[in-house]
Image (cartoon, rainbow, N blue to C red):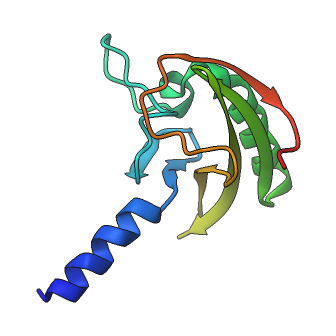
C-alpha cells in the first residue's frame, strides 16, 4: 500500500461522520466512524438494539425519527443543540431508509455541525438535548 493511499484513508476516517446501520428491528449491523459520543454500551447484558445503546439525550428523539422515516420511507433530518460540559455543540441527526434484497435498513448519521465545535470527547458530561435551529 502506498503512503498516499494510507494518508487518504487516515483523512477519510477522521472526516467521516459517526454512522450506524440498523435493520428493521433496530439492531445495529455496522458502526462507522466514532460513535462513542452518541452510543454507549452498558456494562450489563450485551445489546445491539439501537434504542438500548443510544445515550439518553438522543434516545427519545431518535426513536421518533426512526418511526417517522419507516412510515414515510423518506430521509429524516434534524438539528440539536447540546450542552457538552461548558460548551454548546450543534449536531445534525439524519436517518435514511435503505432497501436491500427486499429488507429495510436505516442508516443513522450523527454529524457535528461546523461553528459550534466538534463532539470529540466522551460525553459523560452531556446534560441535555434541545431541538433548535443551529446557525
Question: Residue 47 sits in which quadrant?
Answer: top left
Q: Is residue 102 visible?
A: no
Q: Is residue 5 above or below residue 72?
A: below
Query: In this orientation, which residue lies closer to the viewer: 95 or 67?
Result: 95
- 112 or 61, nearer to the observer: 112
Total residue callouts: 0
Quadrant in the picture for the N terminus: bottom left
Say which of 13 and 71 sits in front: 13
Residue 70 placed where, x, y %?
75, 49
Q: Position of residue 71 (x, y in %)?
A: 82, 48
* Furthest-left residue in this view: 1
Residue 130 seen in the figure: yes
Q: Residue at x 59, y 46 (%)?
A: 24
Residue appearing at x 46%, y 40% in the figure = 120
**Furthest residue toward top:** 44
Residue drawn at x 56%, y 39% is 25
Question: Is residue 92 placed above or below 60 in the rendered structure?
Answer: below
Which x, y percent locates residue 88? Answer: 69, 31
* Residue 122, picture quadrant: top left
Q: Residue at x 41, y 49 (%)?
A: 29
**In the visual, does 25 lie left or right of 45?**
right
- In depth, the one of 35 and 4 nearer the eye is 4
Q: Is 64 on the left or on the right of 102, as rendered? A: right
Amino acid at each position: 500500500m502506498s503512503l498516499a493511499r494510507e494518508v487518504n484513508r487516515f483523512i477519510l476516517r477522521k472526516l467521516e461522520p459517526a454512522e450506524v446501520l440498523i435493520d428493521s428491528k433496530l439492531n445495529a449491523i455496522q458502526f462507522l466512524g466514532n460513535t462513542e459520543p452518541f452510543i454507549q454500551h452498558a456494562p450489563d447484558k450485551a445489546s445491539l438494539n439501537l434504542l438500548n445503546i443510544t445515550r439518553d439525550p438522543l434516545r427519545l428523539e431518535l426513536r421518533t425519527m426512526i418511526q417517522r422515516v419507516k412510515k414515510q420511507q423518506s430521509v429524516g433530518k434534524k438539528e440539536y443543540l447540546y450542552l457538552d460540559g461548558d460548551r454548546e455543540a450543534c449536531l445534525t441527526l439524519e436517518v435514511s431508509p435503505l432497501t436491500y434484497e427486499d429488507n429495510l435498513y436505516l442508516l443513522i448519521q450523527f454529524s457535528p455541525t461546523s461553528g459550534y465545535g466538534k463532539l470529540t470527547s466522551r460525553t459523560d458530561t452531556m446534560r441535555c438535548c434541545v431541538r433548535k435551529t443551529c446557525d
